[in-house]
Image (spheres, rainbow, N blue to C red):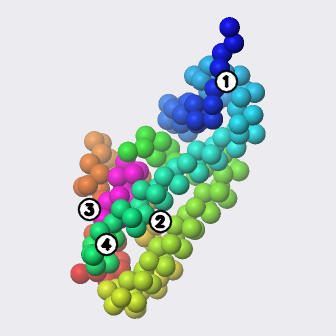
Amino acid sequence: MARAPIGRQQLLDAARDELVRGNGVLELAALTRRAGLSTGALYHHFGSKSGLLAAIYNTFYEGLSHATADAHLPTEADWATREHKRTHLFVAYHFADPLVPVLLNRAALDPQLTELEAVYIQTMSDNAAANIRRGQALGQLPTSVDPDSAAAFVIGGLRHGIAQQLRITPPPNPDQAAERLWRLIAASLGIA
């Protein structure tokens, strides 16, 4: 009796599990054993190991974008209140994913992914800069803050700050980590 072909999502799940278990190392033999398939299925769905890793990055960053979208923020709140909530959502999303320590503590899982990750970080920084400009236009952030520099600082700081918080033994809960990081963000943006 022939086994039903394993799907794309099963490969992604097995690869994520292997990356967590292997601290960022993905051995194809271990992946195929875990998923119970041949490497042909991997190449069919992703084209290469790099294609599989790119799909994992895409899934992570698309989920992050959704988790921190304006739709999840209080609509009638001031800029600082909304961004305080967004910071909590950003941190909670990272703390909930067991792959995050690997994603944040390695330069890249694969050299070909360096550019892809740089694009995601730049997109997050561009969105943050536009958001800072909105806060300035509303009169809720000082105009002396350069939005592009501040956005790069905030996004980089969040990523490195979350990685640092996850290295603490035992790690703080997501709300504690978010509060620590929000205080730094608020101070850098001139929010009292």
Which residue corresponds to the image point at 63% horizontal and 35% vertical from the top-left? 8
Q: Residue 182, located in which quarter of the rendered image?
A: bottom left
Q: Judging from the image, what secondary structure is the residue with disc 1 in?
A: loop
Expressed as whole percent of the image width and height from the top left, the position of residue 48 reads 74, 39
Cα gap from disc 4 to disc 2, whole angstroms: 27 Å
Q: Judging from the image, what secondary structure is the residue with disc 3 in?
A: helix
Q: Is residue 11 magenta?
A: no
The residue beneath circle 1 is: 5
Query: Residue type at mark 4?
Result: Thr
In terms of sequence position, does the residue under pointer 2 or pointer 3 come before the other?
2
Query: Residue type at mark 3?
Result: Glu
The residue beneath circle 2 is: 156
The residue beneath circle 4 is: 75
Query: Residue type at mark 1?
Result: Pro
Residue 19 visible at all: no
Q: Judging from the image, what secondary structure is the residue with disc 4 in?
A: loop
In terms of sequence position, does the residue under pointer 2 or pointer 1 come before the other?
1
Cα gap from disc 2 to disc 1, whole angstroms: 41 Å
In terms of sequence position, does the residue under pointer 1 or pointer 3 come before the other?
1
Disc on res. 179:
3
Expressed as whole percent of the image width and height from the top left, the position of residue 10 reads 57, 31
Q: Judging from the image, what secondary structure is the residue with disc 2 in?
A: helix
Residue 73 visible at all: yes
Cα gap from disc 4 to disc 3, whole angstroms: 21 Å
Q: Residue 91, located in which quarter of the rendered image?
A: bottom left
- How crowded pointer 3 is (Cα within 10 Å; few <14, some 14-19, many 20+) is rated as some
Cα gap from disc 1 to disc 4, whole angstroms: 45 Å
**Of marks 2 and 1, the one in the foreground:** 1
